[in-house]
Amino acid sequence: MADTLSITDNRTGKVYEVPIKDDTIRATDLRKIKVTDDDFGLMTYDPAFMNTAACRSAITFIDGDKGILEYRGYPIEQLAEHSTYLETAYLLLYGELPTQSELDTWTFHITHHTILHENIKNLMDGFRYNAHPMGMLISTVAALSTFYPDAKEIGNPEARRKQIYRLIAKVITIAGFGYRHITGMPFAYPDNDLSYAGNFLNMMFKMTEVRYKPNPALEHALDVLFILHADHEQNCSTSAMRSIGSSHVDPYSALAGAAAALYGPLHGGANEEVIKMLTEIGSIQNIPAFIKRVQDGEVKLMGFGHRVYKNYDPRAKIIKRVADEVFEVTGKNPLLKIALELERIALSDDYFVKRKLYPNVDFYSGLIYQAMKFPMDMFPVLFAIGRTSGWLAQWQEMLLDTDQKISRPRQIYSGAARRDYVNLAERP
Ligand code: ACO
């Protein structure tokens, strides 16, 4: 059996052989299918990239039908149980779990790059008192490129490594400063003796105490949430990271673009929308009426559905367990009851069953964040912190992939045919 696809072009009667590798044909192989010699050749039309692989990647594996998620081959369940976010970030970036000394060096460098230049702090001070922290994060990450001119050296592995340290480290400081800005609190500086998640909690919530001591259960829960959000193969924001990075711009500019993509309510903004939705539903009695509105196409059930998962999102399962740990410390989020009942009803409802709509990672994450006293505006920022390592791993993989060039999709032109300019006075 040959690994090829035979295509008959019924416009010309010609037959073409196209190689199949990894259950995929190369779109450029279709270009030889032409009606005339000066024809451009056949293209594929795939809005929203529903069936187009844009890269080879060895980072994250998802089987959406079976609900499987693995980073570098390691199941997400095992990483959530045994690893830490910084170890997982190392794994994503370098392909293997670190040795003790590799992990120590990695942790040391991340920890020692958390400080922001004071001018960045001043820049953040300039935001309006009610600026959305995700808007602040996007702009401030972009501004970092002006502080580190060596970031342009994307072909230099050492320069890349330095920007990776800086970005993973500084994203928590920017997030913390953003929160302090909107709450009118003085900025809290990083504490190098704390873990990554603990340090972030310190920069968020430190009050007048000399030394902030994070609650170990909350610190651990947050670390697990960062692991769960660290990568998810070629999603909207990661595609943005790769696409922007393919122009060989510095990683700060590319990551600001990726974060902007994440901000949208159909992507990382969904966790915020879930809380708004649960609050609007208000009580269990109102759920059937809400489900009816979803069925009538009036509203979406936020936190449900996924482009790839047509089964329970494995991250949502882990998050439910984390939620229990957090609620033991904080007390139950009163919206949990509504969420659980909504999930129960939705999973047995024909509309959702037929469309294979299951809870995704965002359905429960917002409830945990809210119980931990993060304001809703911070939810997409929390997602961006975890995803920073994944974006950087995908960016570096793209740069080292000799198959890659600048991203440049094709189009089918559907506008007016050539016509001559009409002077203003002569227009009808
Ligand atoms: N509520 C109600 N109906 C839904 C939902 C939902 N949450 N999601 C999908 N559907 C319906 C669609 O209306 C469509 O129905 P139809 O066939 O009758 O037209 C069908 O299910 C298929 O949905 P698509 O929109 O084609 O699925 P797509 O893969 O394009 O969208 C998406 C995926 C954007 C995640 C979608 O499910 C959605 O909007 N969910 C709510 C937002 C959300 O939770 N986003 C977070 C995603 S996970 C993440 O980024 C971390």
Image (cartoon, rainbow, N blue to C red):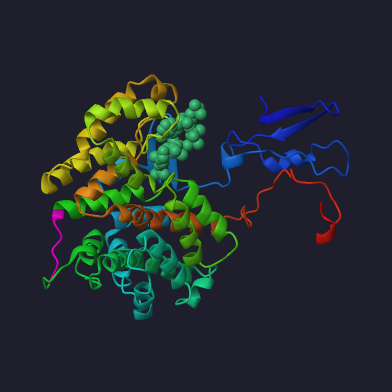
Residue 73, by quadrant, is top left
User: Which region is colored magenta?
Assistant: 211-216
Residue 42 relative to residue 134: left or right: right
x, y percentage for residue 107? Answer: 29, 65
Prevalent SS, magenta region: loop
Compared with 300, 197 (above or below) is below
- The quarter of the picture where the N terminus appears is top right
Closest to the observer: 266 or 307? 266
Specify whether residue 255 is painted magenta. Answer: no
Q: Is residue 64 visible?
A: no
Q: Return the residue found at the far bottom.
A: 118
x, y percentage for residue 320? Answer: 24, 38
Q: Quadrant of ligand 1?
A: top left
Q: Return the residue found at the far right.
A: 37
Q: Residue at x 15, y 44 (%)?
A: 327
Q: Residue at x 49, y 65 (%)?
A: 251
Q: Residue at x 43, y 46 (%)?
A: 267
x, y percentage for residue 18? Answer: 72, 34
Compared with 122, 102 (above or below) is above
Closest to the observer: 137 or 14? 137
Closest to the observer: 295 or 311? 295
Q: Residue at x 14, y 55 (%)?
A: 216
Compared with 240, 185 (above or below) is below
Residue 278, by quadrant, is top left
